[in-house]
Amino acid sequence: MPWRDWLHGAASWLYPPRCACCGVFVQAVRQSGVMLCPSCYKALPFISHASPHFSPGRETPWVQAWAPFHYKATARTLVTNLKYHQQQPCAGLLGRFMAQMPLFRGEGTLGRGQGGAFSKALLVPVPLHIQALRRRGFNQSALIAKALAKLTGVELCLDALVRLRPTRPLEGLGRLERQAELCDVVATRAARCTMLHQRPVVLIDDVMTTGATAAACCQALKSSGAGPVAVLTAARVTEPGAAKADDKP
């Protein structure tokens, strides 16, 4: 309607959109409620090949791990702005890029087999402990999962997993130390076991660092009878020392 167009134009004039990363005023196409200036968009550190990440020589409880970005440059800023600076619309932008992964076209392990296994998949976010949730006010992984469910049509279960106790900050800890800290921390919610039974799961998180958090969640899901689990994060740490406190406390 014309009056809505007028209101939108007036709002854009009064409150010009800013880049979600650097904060400069931008005149570009709005993407999922956030904007990126040309420089920040160009700096997005895409993982060059759209294929799942495997860990050579290391057994993992997930079948595949996917991410559109390396955890640096614009991608790191988007995650940080979402996680620590209350810029929740960044979840929609990250979700937009994650929704383009081949995983959602039925490619990869979850897409194989008779009957279109991926059509039965369930999106499950990594949980926050209630204390951390109260401090932050939201679970960034849940916000990303909501955006993905809307964009892809894959069923979402926000409360399939529960964090049983808080953990100390994981900054500076190696993989084995993180695994020890996260031992028996995540469990499947009893009321969701029937929903999870033998269903493929896509575990959603913001960043994969050592994989300790993802492993704890995958083990909880598998122990409750879930089918194969794939991990999908917005970004993946690929350089030593690139992450500070990216696994959830």
Image (cartoon, rainbow, N blue to C red):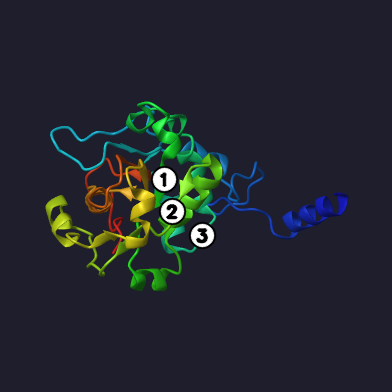
Q: Helix or strand or loop: what does disc 1 sit on?
A: strand
The answer to which of 236 and 60 lies nearer the viewer is 60
Percent coordinates x, y for residue 159 in the rendering: 40, 60
Q: Helix or strand or loop: what does disc 3 sit on?
A: loop
Residue 87 disc label: 3
Instruction: Work out whether 25 lies above or below 153.
Output: below
240 left or right, relative to 207: left
Instruction: Work out whether 228 lies above or below 24.
Output: above
Are the two marked residues, 1 and 3, in contact with CB atoms closer than 8 angstroms? no
Q: Hey, what amino acid is under mark 3?
A: Gln
Question: Dot 3, how many residues are within 10 Å of its Cα: few (below 14), some (14-19), or many (20+)?
Answer: some
**Disc 1 designates what residue?**
122
Q: Hey, what amino acid is under mark 1?
A: Leu
| Structural distance between the alpha carbons of marks 1 and 3 | 26 Å
Which callout, 2 or 3, points at the residue further toward the start of the chain? 3
Q: Helix or strand or loop: what does disc 2 sit on?
A: loop
View extreme (front): residue: 194
Are the two marked residues, 1 and 2, in contact with CB atoms closer than 8 angstroms? yes
View extreme (right): residue: 2
**Disc 2 designates what residue?**
157
- The answer to which quarter of the image holds residue 160 is bottom left
Instruction: Work out whether 100 lies above or below 128.
Output: above
Which callout, 1 or 3, points at the residue further toward the start of the chain? 3
